[in-house]
Image: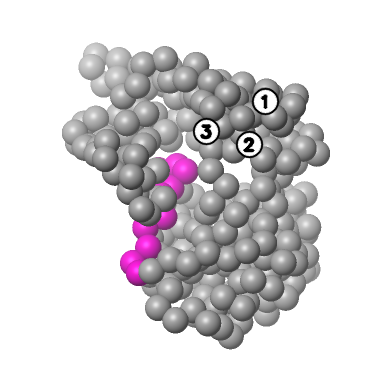
């Protein structure tokens, strides 16, 4: 049983060729593009991918639209970003997994993030992601950094998905996370308006990682001094110091990102209250 591949893009001409090279084993690669203005489309077609375009609105809406409206050749879909690379071991594990899926409708896999050539082995918030699934059994929630909601049993595959979030440089990372922080702030303000509830028990003990992550986020949003706490958690509790200078840099950047969210929540709240 083969696997279709889904790649979301927006101006990814630099990273896309290397990404597609690692999924060349699939005969059905779909590039879901948000109207790139560079050579992304040309590169995708040159490398044999199908291209579908849609105007981006927010992450969950965009991804959900793709899963419901794109026509995939195969019943299983592997979702990968342009700055990610599927290792050969991961490719073999995924193909073997779907052959013996049984009742499983999705699989989580492990991702390795890199910064300046260093694997951020300890400072990562979480290395596990749901990226192999039957599209009719998957949906996403939240405006940014979506939570994956699976309707059915979940398995796990071996091998690594390698991620290079700084492949376009630090300036581009900051620009991207400036946009992400705006979506995060909007999500927090919306949750407060809807009086979104969280469960401390589920935040600590929910068996499903994505359910646990949802409640952890809701708890975290109510915590004072979040940027400092995030730095201490990533650098000391998670062991980011073991990743050397790269770990220190990454923990600092994540704390900065959190502070951007805090400031934008204050700004949005003030604007709505005026």
Q: Whole-percent x and y of residue 124?
A: 59, 38
Location of residue 40 (image quadrant): bottom right
Contact? badges 2 and 3 (CB < 8 Å):
no
Residues drawn in magenta: 140-152
Q: Nearer the viewer, mark 2 or mark 3?
A: 2
What is the CA distance from the residue labelled 2 to the residue labelled 1? 8 Å
Decide which of tag 2 and tag 1 comes sooner along the chain: 2
Q: Whole-percent x and y of residue 64?
A: 41, 60
Toward the viewer: 152 or 55? 152
| Picture residue at 52% right of the left edge, 75% below the top | 76
Q: Secondary structure at mark 3?
A: helix
Contact? badges 2 and 1 (CB < 8 Å):
yes
What is the CA distance from the residue labelled 2 to the residue labelled 3? 26 Å
| Picture residue at 64% right of the left edge, 71% below the top | 93
Q: Residues within 10 Å of mark 3 (few under 14, many from 20)?
A: few
Which disc is residue 122 wearing?
Answer: 2
Q: Secondary structure at mark 2?
A: loop
Q: Which residue is labeled 1 in the image?
A: 241
Q: Nearer the viewer, mark 3 or mark 1?
A: 1
Decide which of tag 3 and tag 1 comes sooner along the chain: 3
Task: Kindly give the residue lying farthest to the left in the view shown.
Answer: 195
Q: Which residue is labeled 3 in the image?
A: 179
């Amino acid at each position: 049983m083969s696997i279709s591949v889904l790649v979301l893009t927006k101006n990814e001409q630099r990273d896309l060729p290397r990404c597609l090279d690692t999924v060349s084993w699939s005969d059905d690669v779909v590039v879901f593009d948000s109207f790139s203005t560079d050579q992304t489309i040309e590169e995708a077609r040159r490398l044999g991918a199908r291209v579908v375009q849609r105007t981006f609105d927010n992450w969950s809406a965009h991804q959900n639209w793709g899963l419901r409206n794109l026509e995939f050749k195969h019943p299983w879909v592997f979702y990968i970003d342009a700055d990610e690379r599927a290792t050969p071991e991961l490719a073999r594990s995924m193909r073997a997994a779907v052959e013996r899926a049984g009742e499983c409708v999705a699989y989580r896999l492990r991702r390795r993030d890199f910064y300046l050539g260093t694997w951020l082995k300890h400072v990562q918030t979480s290395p596990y992601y749901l990226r192999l699934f039957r599209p009719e059994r998957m949906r996403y929630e939240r405006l940014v950094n979506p939570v994956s909601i699976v309707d059915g049993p979940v398995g796990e595959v071996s091998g690594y998905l390698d991620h290079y979030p700084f492949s376009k440089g630090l300036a581009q990372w900051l620009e991207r996370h400036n946009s992400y922080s705006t979506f995060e702030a909007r999500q927090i303000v919306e949750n407060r308006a809807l009086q979104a509830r969280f469960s401390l028990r589920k935040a600590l003990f929910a068996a499903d990682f994505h359910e646990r992550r949802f409640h952890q986020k809701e708890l975290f949003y109510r915590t004072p001094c979040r940027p400092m706490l995030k730095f201490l958690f990533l650098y000391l509790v998670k062991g980011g110091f073991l990743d050397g200078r790269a770990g220190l840099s990454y923990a600092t950047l994540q704390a900065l990102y959190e502070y951007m969210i805090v400031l934008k929540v204050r700004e949005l709240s003030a604007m709505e209250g005026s």
